[in-house]
């Protein structure tokens, strides 16, 4: 036997390559790998579901409520407590779960530092809550701050705030004075106060300026767009002292004299108790 033949015989008689359970007839059995892959995906999905089961977008349960006119608005946040409670409680909550869900919801506080908000503004919102109660109900809130764009703010109501402000002049010129009375019944408008540039020593014909003490911006923050913040009034109906005899109106004097005479006659029509009649018996008295 030559060396070449020896080598060929040695190769034929050598150890066979071991067969693996995933091989059959020299081919790979991919079914096992497919099953393993499916199991891995299911496990990953289950883990993700477990992690995210109580993670939710709390913004869906928060609604901004605006007060004031566009550009002057403030905002408070209304929490959908019923929807949030349903989300956290599940289908058949026990007594403890119901208790802690309620306590957690009560602990939630939503606020912002933005003021004088207008449509299009970016509002930054902060959410505070009791972490212990959140842990009890497994509420996972990934972000305690968020932003949103303001919209839906109205332009406010244009109001003549002097429509129900009664301005009255009293006294006699040149020593008259002015009184300002707020007759509004609206809960906010009736709280407005007013000042005058001259309260007393008013002369017939003087023009008095009345000004609202609250600034325009303050009214706008309550949804009131004031048509005017001040108003002028003329003291044109005042009585005045007569300083010169030429200013005396004789017609007025005659009227006064006539009224006096009529009053005397009325009061003395019955002559029975006149003192001079009793003394003299003369009915002319």
Image: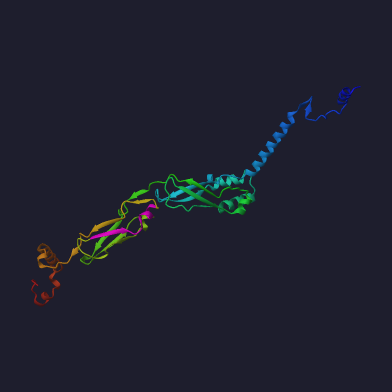
Where is residue 53, by image quadrant?
A: top right
Q: Indicate the quadrant containing the N terminus: top left, top right, bottom left or bottom right.
A: top right
> How many marks on residues?
0
Q: Indicate the quadrant containing the C terminus: top left, top right, bottom left or bottom right.
A: bottom left
* In this rendering, position of residue 151 left or right of residue 101: left
* In this rendering, position of residue 84 left or right of residue 150: right
Q: In this view, does 251 lie above or below 13?
A: below
Along the viewing direction, whichever of 185 and 85 lies nearer the viewer:
85
Q: Position of residue 151 (x, y in %)?
A: 44, 44
Point 34% across, 49% down: residue: 158
Look at the image and tell me whether residue 180 can be seen: yes
* In this rendering, position of residue 198 left or right of residue 141: left
Q: Where is residue 216 in the image (x, y as percent from the top left)?
A: 35, 54
Point 54% across, 48% down: residue: 81
Q: Position of residue 187 (x, y in %)?
A: 39, 55
* 212 in the magenta segment: yes
Outermost bottom residue:
279
- Write down the region rendered in magenta: 207-220
Q: Position of residue 165 (x, y in %)?
A: 30, 56
Q: Is residue 196 above or below residue 23?
A: below
Looking at the picture, the colour scheme in use is rainbow
* In this rendering, position of residue 7 left or right of residue 229: right
Q: In this view, does 247 lie above or below 76?
A: below
Where is residue 46, by image quadrant?
A: top right
* 215 in the magenta segment: yes
Where is residue 83, by image quadrant?
A: top right
Outermost right residue:
1
Look at the image and tell me whether residue 186 can be seen: no
């Amino acid at each position: 036997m030559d060396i070449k033949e020896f080598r060929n015989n040695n190769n034929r008689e050598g150890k066979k390559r071991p067969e693996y359970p995933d091989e059959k007839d020299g081919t790979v059995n991919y079914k096992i790998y497919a099953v393993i892959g499916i199991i891995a995906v299911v496990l990953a999905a289950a883990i993700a579901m477990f992690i995210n089961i109580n993670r939710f977008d709390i913004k869906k349960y928060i609604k901004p409520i605006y007060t004031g006119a566009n550009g002057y608005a403030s905002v408070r946040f209304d929490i959908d407590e019923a929807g949030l409670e349903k989300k956290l409680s599940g289908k058949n909550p026990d007594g403890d779960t119901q208790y802690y869900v309620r306590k957690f919801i009560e602990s939630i506080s939503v606020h912002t530092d933005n003021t004088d908000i207008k449509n299009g503004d970016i509002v930054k919102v902060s959410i505070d809550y009791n972490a212990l109660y959140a842990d009890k109900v497994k509420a996972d809130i990934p972000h305690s701050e968020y932003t949103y764009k303001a919209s839906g703010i109205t332009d406010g109501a244009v109001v003549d705030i002097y429509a129900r402000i009664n301005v009255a002049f009293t006294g006699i010129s040149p020593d008259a004075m002015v009184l300002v009375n707020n007759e509004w019944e609206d809960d906010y408008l009736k709280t407005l106060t007013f000042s005058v540039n001259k309260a007393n020593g008013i002369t017939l014909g003087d023009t008095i300026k009345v000004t609202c003490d609250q600034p325009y911006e303050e009214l706008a923050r309550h949804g009131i767009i004031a048509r005017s913040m001040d108003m002028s009034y003329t003291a044109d109906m005042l009585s005045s002292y007569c300083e010169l005899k030429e200013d005396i109106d004789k017609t007025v004097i005659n009227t006064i004299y006539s009224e006096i005479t009529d009053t005397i006659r009325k009061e003395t029509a019955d002559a029975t108790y006149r003192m001079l009649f009793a003394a003299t018996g003369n009915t002319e008295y």
